[in-house]
Image (tube, helix red, strand yellow):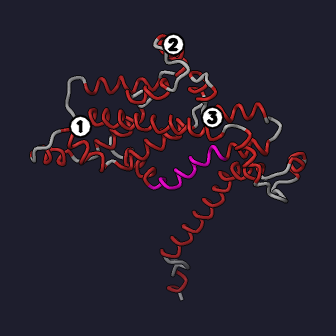
């Protein structure tokens, strides 16, 4: 009788199962909180003007107006803005990956005089607000005749402009790679360029995807840079186009939400397909210092 009373009601496996169920239940509830703004945007984009006037009385559109997305695309030169955004994003991603990976490899794997001091100087640039260097940068681009072109938005990426965080991220990943790999490659006759291309880059694929995703999001959603340097409407990006659309159709919240969803959709799709590598890159770069 005493042994039966002392016997636990649930064994360890059952307790772990209950904990997992509770954890997943909490995560599912929390996910609805994060999804609510997007669902609100989507339902607003599908409403009729009459349903919009009813405010919060109508949350789900009774007759979804998918034509609002077509109207939003036709209201502005959407394809031209899309082409301009893609040109800038692709070139900025290429330049950032080139400059960040090469600089990170130099800081992590090469021994040169003053390496650690220059790395601290590079990190210190992250604390400089963009407002401090905006006017000198604008004057410099004006003197060399780059204002009104895409060059101020693209060229700095090839020289590490704004890549201090990415260099730090990749350096942490490079430092986690055993140095024996590089030493054995040098014994076999490989130089640093071959080691960098054939060994280091394939091994740091998760970190590279993470940097590429961050760069894409930053360049795709950038509004301040194009606003300052792009004066020709034919060079405007989607961020500037959305602002112009808002000024023209400020009272049509259905069309505004439809345009906003179309602009943010590529970011959601890319993150959906790269989230595994993104999480791996963030996790591994935070393990080793």
Q: What range of the chain is rendered magenta?
A: 262-276
Q: Helix or strand or loop: what does disc 1 sit on?
A: helix
Q: Is residue 148 magenta?
A: no
Please state the horizontal and vertical placement of residue 193, each as a whole percent of the image: 21, 39
Residue identified by numbered label 3 = 239
Please state if 249 lies on the left or on the right of 10 as rendered: right
Q: Which sits earlier in the primary sequence, circle 1 or circle 2?
A: 1
- Rendered position, 210 above or below 21: above
Camera-nearest label, 2 or 3? 2
Q: Residues within 10 Å of mark 3 (few under 14, many from 20)?
A: many
Front-most of residues 159 and 183: 159
Identify the residue shown where x is 33% and y is 37%. Answer: 101
**Earlier sequence position, callout 2 versus callout 3:** 2
* Among numbered discs 1 and 3, the one appearing first in the sequence: 1
* Image quadrant occupied by the N terminus: bottom right
Which of discs 1 and 2 lies nearer the camera? The answer is: 2
Mark seen at residue 109: 1
* Number of numbered discs overlaid on the protein picture: 3
Residue lying at 51% horizontally and 70% vertically, measured from the top left: 16
Per the model, the C-alpha gap separating discs 1 and 2 is: 38 Å
Q: Alpha carbon of mark 1 to alpha carbon of mark 3: how far?
A: 39 Å
Is residue 213 positioned above or below 240 on the image? Answer: below
Q: Are marks 2 and 3 in contact (CB under 8 Å)?
A: no
Q: Is residue 271 magenta?
A: yes
Quick one: which residue is furthest to the bottom in this view? 1
Percent of width and height locating residue 235 = 58, 29
- Find numbered disc 2 in the image and state the secondary structure of the residue it sits on: helix
Residue position marked by numbered label 2 in the rendering: 142
The chief SS type of the magenta part is helix
Q: Quadrant of residue 276?
A: bottom left
In the picture, the disc for residue 61 is none
**Label 3 element class:** helix
């Amino acid at each position: 009788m005493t042994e039966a009373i002392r016997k636990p009601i649930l064994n360890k496996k059952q307790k772990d199962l209950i904990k997992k169920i509770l954890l997943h239940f909490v995560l599912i509830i929390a996910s609805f909180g994060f999804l609510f703004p997007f669902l609100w945007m989507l339902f607003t984009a599908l409403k009729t003007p009459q349903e919009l006037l009813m405010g919060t009385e109508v949350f789900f559109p009774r007759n979804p107006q998918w034509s609002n997305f077509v109207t939003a695309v036709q209201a502005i030169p959407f394809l031209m803005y899309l082409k301009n955004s893609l040109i800038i994003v692709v070139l900025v991603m290429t330049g950032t990956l080139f400059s960040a990976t090469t600089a990170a490899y130099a800081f992590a794997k090469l021994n040169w005089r003053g390496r650690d001091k220059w790395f601290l100087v590079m990190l210190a640039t992250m604390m400089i607000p963009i407002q401090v260097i905006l006017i000198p940068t604008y004057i410099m681009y004006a003197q060399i005749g780059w204002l009104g072109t895409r060059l101020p938005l693209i060229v700095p990426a090839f020289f590490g402009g704004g890549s201090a965080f990415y260099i730090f991220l990749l350096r942490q990943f490079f430092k986690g790679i055993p140095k024996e790999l590089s030493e054995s490659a040098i014994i076999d006759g490989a130089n640093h360029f071959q080691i960098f291309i054939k060994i280091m880059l394939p091994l740091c694929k998760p970190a590279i995807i993470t940097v590429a995703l961050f760069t894409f999001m930053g360049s795709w959603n950038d509004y301040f840079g194009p606003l300052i340097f792009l004066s020709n409407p034919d060079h405007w990006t989607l961020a500037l186009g959305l602002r112009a659309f808002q000024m023209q159709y400020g009272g049509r919240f259905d069309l505004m939400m439809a345009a906003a969803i179309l602009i943010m959709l590529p970011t959601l799709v890319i993150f959906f397909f790269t989230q595994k590598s993104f999480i791996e890159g963030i996790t591994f770069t935070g393990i080793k210092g």
